[in-house]
Amino acid sequence: MLNRLLSHDLPRSRWLALLLVAIVLVLALTPFVFPGTRALNVAAKVIVFIVLTASFDLLLGYTGIVSFAHTMFFGIGAYGIAIATTRLGPTWPALALGTACALVVSLALALVIGLFSLRVRAIFFAMITLAVASAFATLASQLSDFTGGEDGLSFKVPDALQPGTSYAADPVLGASIDGRLLTYYVIFVAAVVLVLLLLRIVNSPFGRVLQAIRENDFRAEAIGYRIVVFRTLASVISAVFATLAGVLLALWLRYNGPDTTLSFEIMLDVLLIVVIGGMGTIYGAIVGSTLLVLAQNYLQDLMKLAAGAVQDVPFLSQIVSPERWLLWLGVLFVLSVYYFPSGVVGRLRALHVRRPDHAKR
Amino acid sequence: MSDKALLSLAGVHTHIGAYHILHGVDLEVPIGDVTMLLGRNGAGKTTTLRTIMGLWPASAGSIAFDGRRIGGPSGDADGSTDPALRTPEIAALSIAYVPENMGIFSDLSVAENMLLAARSARTVEQLDRTRLEWLFGLFPALKTFWLHPAGKLSGGQKQMLAIARAMIEPRRLLLIDEPSKGLAPAIVQNLIAALKELKRTATTVLLVEQNFEMAKALGDHVAVMDDGRVVHRGPMAELAGDEAMQQRLLGLSLAAHA
Amino acid sequence: MTARLDARPLALVAGLAFVAWPLVGSSSTWLTLTLAGLAMGMIVFIAASGLTLVFGLMDVLNFGHSLFIALGAFVATSVFAALAGEAASTSVATSLGLVGVAMLAAMTLSGTIGLAFERVIVRPVYGHHLKQILVTIGGAIVGEELIKVVWGPAQIALPPPEALRGSLLIGEATVDKLRLVSVAVGLVVLALLLWTLNRTKIGLLIRAGVQDREMVESLGYRIRRLFVGVFAAGSALAGLGGCLWGMNQQIVTPQIGGQVNVLLFIVIIIGGLGSTLGCLVGALLVGLLTNYVGFLAPKATMFSSIGLMVAVLLWRPQGLYPVVNR
């Protein structure tokens, strides 16, 4: 049964399976195991990023398309419900409408981009998506009437999900049963469903054709698969999932602005996760997101400690300053690309294979 | 006819990705003569030339030029530990390569193409005038289109340019890949005439060809390839005179091939 | 060389300027905008020329090119700070000299870091486009953070030297003195670049290598060494571009690289990857368009460049001057 749930794409490594189970369990039980808003926020961010990165993996790892426009769809989803609830009030129909509109816009854009990608070389395409994403971010911060501009939009969610709504007078196991908790589990369940769906997609005949195209598109075309169709479909599916991730994030934050979803930093985070986690695995997104978000939030604390220790050494103190955590992430990123090309998932899987068979390289 | 080999290949294998193209090529190219490399399509002739030039690494065996090892994994059969040379280094040993696609730089002028091939000249003015005149005599089109972009030349003219580039400076070895491919018979005759001129300079040439007429006219020695191996080696005269052998090795007879 | 030049893209530049004339209305404003556009175009061209050559020659996509631009800008701030006395001088010669020193310093540092960048970051990933994109982005991130370590994370003002402040009156148009200097520098760089590419053997090798790297190696040239040189030169030029950009913006932030990066990509895509002339035309078009649109409809500036890029790609999917590749 587990096999069918995971679409026959098992972790194939004892360690990986353990890691995944651990992550899922911790995420499921965070409100009770790690009390406090910070932990919950970190966990929610991990969940959202898992969906976002997994959808990017579909595009990059399975189809072989490099696109920097991914955050654009993320933003569209978030803005979709932000704008809808701001204008129509915090109701469920508003949420539904916002989500639907966001999906339609993403679909249309993804179609255009996907079709355009076939007219130009892959390298061109990567650069063009960079330009388009950049333009979109600028657009979002300029259309202040619509999007709240630089400041973004703060909005309310339906009462059931509002933090103020309490479902039980006393906290259970350390967590207060309120709208926030409900929201958390809505996001969690949604993410689980979406990831399983993605697994289903990449392991379907469609997914296999994508991989064939990634390996050798000439050959795939020669065999009879129309690359246009497959690539465009992959772009669209990837965009749709990213949009939904955006919806989830906005639901949690009850706020969205250009920097929350559209910044290049987020695109970099996604890239980092996919590379460190392992491309073309979907599980890589889970492991990578957890690592990155944890590092982002708790590494800085570590660095603060270290900075305190070397406070008086001029150059060193600057390098270890918690504000420069991106420096270390960057170094880790570069090292991962060189020495860790298959990511954590790949390494864990290789561990498992090497033991019985020494001849394999 | 000489016996000393300027270039020799021993047990050369080449893999391109997953494909095993050369299955142990043994070849000797005697100095000062023209050696023809014949064979059907897909026999591995182009691969052999590219492997000699270092464009594709030999996965096994060794390649030696003038007694000096230039290709093949180090520490192989002959126990040598010199690493294989890179393409520019191989070319710098005075080896000229005229690939199948001619390698003409279409955006550059004919003059600039020639200048590139002349390693000792920094500007067009520094090209050896005598040599240039000799080449103009063999390939008049070069003089006519001297300043024109090489891309504007006809197929035959491009081929002439490609060969002229290999001749702008004296070279110890020329590797030429199917120069007559796609050319009209009249042009092929011009080509043969030009290469005969080259022969007079006693340059060592390894010439891949499918055109047997050309092979007969120019070759001193011949090696026939099939399935990534050299299946026959010997004097050209021998093969030219033996129709049965031609039929067997090349699937053709002299009469049938105009 | 008598290769007939495909002049249509060049005509585009003139065409754009002419179309803008009636739209802008006033001739003097048009002149100011056009000169500003040309200056911007020149600066972007200088910064982008290295990027397009590096790609054309060795098929290497350097997403970290912006790092050298930022370096150049920051070096300029240090030079100006160190020579504050000269900056305050009212002598044109001193001011020009100061700018010259800043440019040289920017080029030297960027070029040197470029050499290191190529050795450490780029060389291990030849031939792998995806890895190149990832690794050069990573390198750029690390570099930008290191810039913040050395110069601090805040923005630094870069006012032009005293004698180059303000503008000149040419006819009825006001022209920034600094813009004039930028255009002049741009023209000099352009001339040097064109001369090197068309009149020297090294330039010949580069042009040939962009078309068919393998054949150039088969002719006996170590194109890898050439490449390192081109990479360093491209980085130095980027540094020069950054220096000029910073001076024109009068403010330098660590994000300056990222801001210009997108513009660079748009320009080299429009021009055609590997084509210097294309890069020039693309840069001029973007420069002019940005300035005209900035005047006519300021909110649409970013889109005008992208719109231009899309329009060009629909006309010529490989860019204005596609490089014929092996």
Image (cartoon, helix red, strand yellow):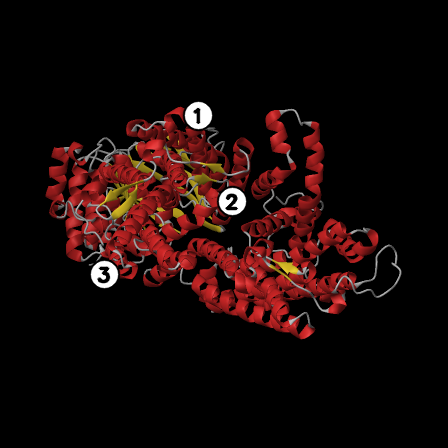
Say which of marks 2 and 3 sits in front: 2
Q: Chain of mark 2?
A: C
Residue B117 appears anywhere in the view = yes
Within 10 Å of the Cα at label 3, are there few (<14), some (14-19), or many (20+) other Cα atoms? few
Tell me the quarter of the image containing the N terminus of chain B: top left
The relative height of residue C211 versus residue C164 in the rendered view (above or below) is below
Say which of marks 1 and 3 sits in front: 1
User: Where in the figure is residue C210, as x and y percent of width and height?
Assistant: 33, 45
User: Where in the figure is residue C259, as x and y percent of width and height?
Assistant: 46, 47
User: Where in the figure is residue A171, as x and y percent of width and height?
Assistant: 87, 58
Determine whether the residue tagged by mark 2 lies in a helix, strand or loop: helix
The residue pinned by badge 2 equals: C137
The relative height of residue C94 versus residue B221 in the rendered view (above or below) is above
The residue pinned by badge 3 equals: B256
Q: Residue at x 27, y 59 (%)?
A: C25
Q: Nearer the viewer, residue A162 or A19?
A: A162
Left-right relation of A359 to C23: right
Q: Nearer the viewer, residue B204 or B53?
A: B53
User: Where in the figure is residue B161, as x and y percent of width and height?
Assistant: 20, 46
Would you identify the image quadrant in which residue C208 lies?
top left
